[in-house]
Amino acid sequence: MKMRLPDFFGKRKKNKVRNRNAALQPFKLVKYFSFTSLGVILVASFVLSWVISNNAKHVLLARSEAYSELFAENLNRQVFLRFVLPTVIRYGSIALSNHTQFERLDAIVHNITRGMGIDSVTIYDSEENIISYSTKPELVGKTDMGGIEYFKALRGENNSVLESSGSLFNLLPGPPPVYCKLKTYIPFRQERKLGERSGSIMGVIEIVNDLSGDMEAIADLQGRIIISSLTIMGILFGVLAFIVVRANRIMEARARERQVLEEKLYEADRLASLGKMVAAVSHEIKNPLGIVRSTAEILGNRISRVAPGNEHLAAIIVEETARLDSIVREFLDFARPQDPRMEPARLNSLVERLSRFMQPELAKKSVVLELELDPDLPEIIMDSEQIYQVLLNMVINSIQAMPDGGTITVRTGSAPAGDGVVLEIRDTGAGMSAAKMEQIFTPFFTDKSRGTGLGLAIAKNIIEQHNGCIEVTSIEGEGSTFTIIFRPVEE
């Protein structure tokens, strides 16, 4: 008969599980915050690399523009002093269409620009937008090439314009190389004295400075910064991911351990409450049972004299009260377990004692008991009577699992790790399902028509008090095997 007691702690258990899940939430938030922070740092690294490279670009352009203006002013001074004045004195006017004058100006300009990294020098006429001179001969004579910068220079304003194409992606194979040229326009003025320029504008000087190499170097720097940032962030991400995954596993393992402990605590609380109830009820039942049994025995004696042939009625009462007394005793053993009296003993001796005691019952049930005892098995510290009770309960359960007879094998030996002894009880009975195996050590669980369901629960408690463990394996239709491992116990 299965006994089901009300779950007084069901709500409490659900609350504990809910609290456990809630306890994991802060860690999940920390994990999400960590990955979010990593993403922010990664984006910030991109922005920082972009800001650094752009700042380097602006500094380069500012310095190049200042250098170009300074060079243009020096070119203005040198051309005026070394070409304009001598030419006006010698020829009376400047005519660059004259091959001699053009060649002289070209020689002076090339001499000034040699080694200065200047791409080209162009001089525009002041009266019309036409190129009077250029270090690139194919540009001489072309009109309307100055643009708005030309007219600003005619008004006396120094100005520059940047022509560029390409980006960071130009470093990849395939795209054309980076193109960047800085064009600086200054008015070509007359100079009265050395270093003193008048307001009279003779034309416009255009200085073209090729910055393609510098811009490519900046793009390369930007690429290196981004790659370095990605590498560092990748390493940090890997380390952080490893830490988070490791911490997550540790937290999950601890959560599972805590859940197991909470379940054990819940079971202990539940069993403690049940134990108090069972002890109280059993105590109240035990005394009336003794009175009923003694009264039935007296009535049996009187019935044999008054109504011979009806003595079996009193015998039934005595038998049933004895069974109830055995049940009450099981309840008390479960509710108030006795402390074990630990002393050295031989496990093989208990098995042999059990074999002698159970021979009549085994023969009656057509069950064969086979013993496989290790003769070199050492003594262990145990309470012999409690362990004998466990063995007796196990063998009785095996006999009940084989109503048509079978074989029970009891084996003893050393534990696999060599730090204890093993007791194995194997039968060829009906076996058990997986669902039943999960419940057999639960107090009050039984699938028998008679019984309390406390035998295996009491056996498990006794084994655990002896620093041991009990396991069961079973296959339906083939039989079950109970394995008990006794670990060394300090005296």
Image (spheres, grey):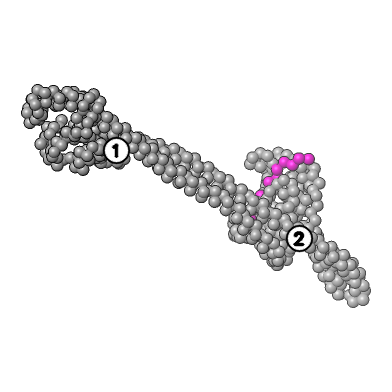
**Residue at figure coordinates x 61%, y 60% from the top left:** 435
Horizontal side of residue 375 vs 248, given as left or right: right
**Quadrant of image for the C terminus:** top right
Label 1 sits on a secondary structure element that is helix
Q: Is residue 410 magenta?
A: no
**Quadrant of image for the N terminus:** bottom right
**Residue at figure coordinates x 58%, y 51% from the top left:** 26
Label 2 sits on a secondary structure element that is helix
Number of on-image labels: 2
Q: Is residue 487 magenta?
A: yes
Query: Are the residues tagged 1 and 2 within 8 Å (C-beta)?
Result: no
Which label belongs to residue 171?
Answer: 1
Q: Amino acid at mark 1?
A: Leu
Q: Amino acid at mark 2?
A: Ser
Give the class, few, some or many, for how many residues have Cα within 10 Å of label 1's Cα (few <14, many ≥20). some
Q: Quadrant of residue 218?
A: top left
Please give the range of residues in magenta.
479-491
Please provide percent x and percent y for residue 324: 80, 65
Please provide percent x and percent y for residue 19: 63, 56
Q: Give the labeled residue for mark 2.
A: 273
**437 or 379, which is in the foreground?**
437
Between tags 1 and 2, which lies in front? 1
**Residue at figure coordinates x 72%, y 45% from the top left:** 467
